[in-house]
Image: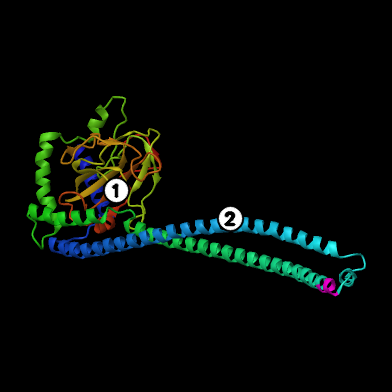
Amino acid sequence: MNRKKNKIVFVAICILTIITPLNIKAQTRRQLEEEVEKRTKELQAEQEKIKENNIKIEEKKKKIENLETKIKETVEKITNLQKEIEENTKSIEKKSEESKQIMAYYQISNGENAYLKYAFGASTITDMIYRVSLVEQLTNYNEQIIKELKILIEETNKKKKEITKEKEKQTTLKKDLQKEKENIEAENKKIKAGMPSIEEQIKYDKKQIDDLKTLGCGMDEDIQSCTYRILKEQEAEQEKEEVSPPINDEENEEENTGDEPISKPSTNGFYRPIEYGYITQGYSGYGGHLGVDIGSSNKTIPIYPIKNGTVTATYYDNYGALVVKIRHQYNGRFIYSTYAHLSRWTVSSGQYVSYTDQIGNMGNTGYSFGPHLHLEITTCDWKSFGGGCTWATYQKSTMSPTSLISLPGNWTNR
């Protein structure tokens, strides 16, 4: 009976393998070295572009600061001019009043005759000449006052328009510079977005080649085959020392009478990373969301490996997210699982773990908008020993976790 069941399971595994093939591209150490050399040049070019952009950003900042100073000075000029206008207005009012008083003093109801009467009312020729001269002076003075008032008003209004126009020009220029600065910052952000730092990529790209040399992989030997052959032997020894392989047959499940939910892996032996939860964001592949986001009512729920394997890295990413990476054996190859945004990890690099071992807890670290687990599955890794690919290739090697793990709308067991 058991043999018949085992045969059915074996056939199911073969069928599943055909239906959901791994996204594996054969690559040799020689090809990887060529890719790393090319990618290093590209990264260095991007690095130079970021440096150039940073210089431009600083230049824009200084120009904006200078403009802000000028705008401040212009505002002060406008304030001072406003005071000047107020003073001139008082002066205009004063001179107008003075002119009115002169006119009122020398005018009578029948108009300009007052000047004539005043002039011809002289008792002597000398007095008449004096009076005529005085009338002429008064008339000229009055005309001069009116002329000065007009000029003062015109000049003041002209100056006010010029300064206001200058302020508007400076404000527009400041907005333009601010926009240019934002565009350059956006370009930098685009270069850096969603990727490790350029320095880190170059470092790990070169390390991948050193790792393969250490493992003894030949120049034209398939990386996946080489690393699988060598590392599998190492993991087999480690597995014997650290844990016993779990038994997953039906007899074992029937014997489980505890309160804990019975783990039910998919046919190919992969388990859900948490006991109960739901998908909050799906996988969209290269150029998009590289994994799935998983939430739970328990915001600090324990995280488990999706399959037995070796922890290859524990680290904080560029945004401060706690990350654990695990290498698993599957179908004569390695695949890698990545667990991000943890609140903590409970394992260390190099440790062999079973699917029942807790590796950490769900969290909200790094670039995250709420407690969740970000899970990625790839056929190579850029940061693991012998992972055999660059960050650029890593992104293309991702696969949907749902192709290997049963992840319904929500679940209550692993």
Q: Amino acid at mark 2?
A: Thr
Say whether residue 202 is magenta. no
Viewer-proximal residue, 314 or 413? 314
Residue at point 9%, 40% (across, down): 237
Q: Which quadrant holds residue 82? A: bottom right
Report the disc number at residue 318. Answer: 1
Q: Amino acid at mark 1?
A: Asn
SS state under label 2: helix
Residue 247 against residue 50 in the figure, above or below: above
Q: Position of residue 366 (x, y in %)?
A: 33, 44
Mark 2: few/some/many CA within 10 Å (<14, 14-19, 20+): few
Numbered range of the magenta stretch? 125-129
Query: In the image, 110: left or right of 195?
Result: right
SS state under label 1: loop
Mark 1: few/some/many CA within 10 Å (<14, 14-19, 20+): some
Query: In the image, 397: left or right of 181?
Result: left
Report the disc number at residue 79. Answer: 2
Measured Cα–Cα span from mark 1 to mark 2: 49 Å
Say whether residue 126 is magenta. yes
Q: Position of residue 409 (x, y in %)?
A: 41, 42
Residue 182 against residue 337 in the figure, above or below: below
Can the viewer see residue 303?
A: no
Residue at point 19%, 63% (across, down): 35
Viewer-proximal residue, 198 or 148? 148
Can the viewer see residue 322?
A: yes
Is the N terminus in the top left, top right, bottom left or bottom right quadrant? top left
Q: Main secondary structure of the magenta part?
A: helix
Residue at point 36%, 51% (across, down): 283
Q: Position of residue 114 (x, y in %)?
A: 89, 68
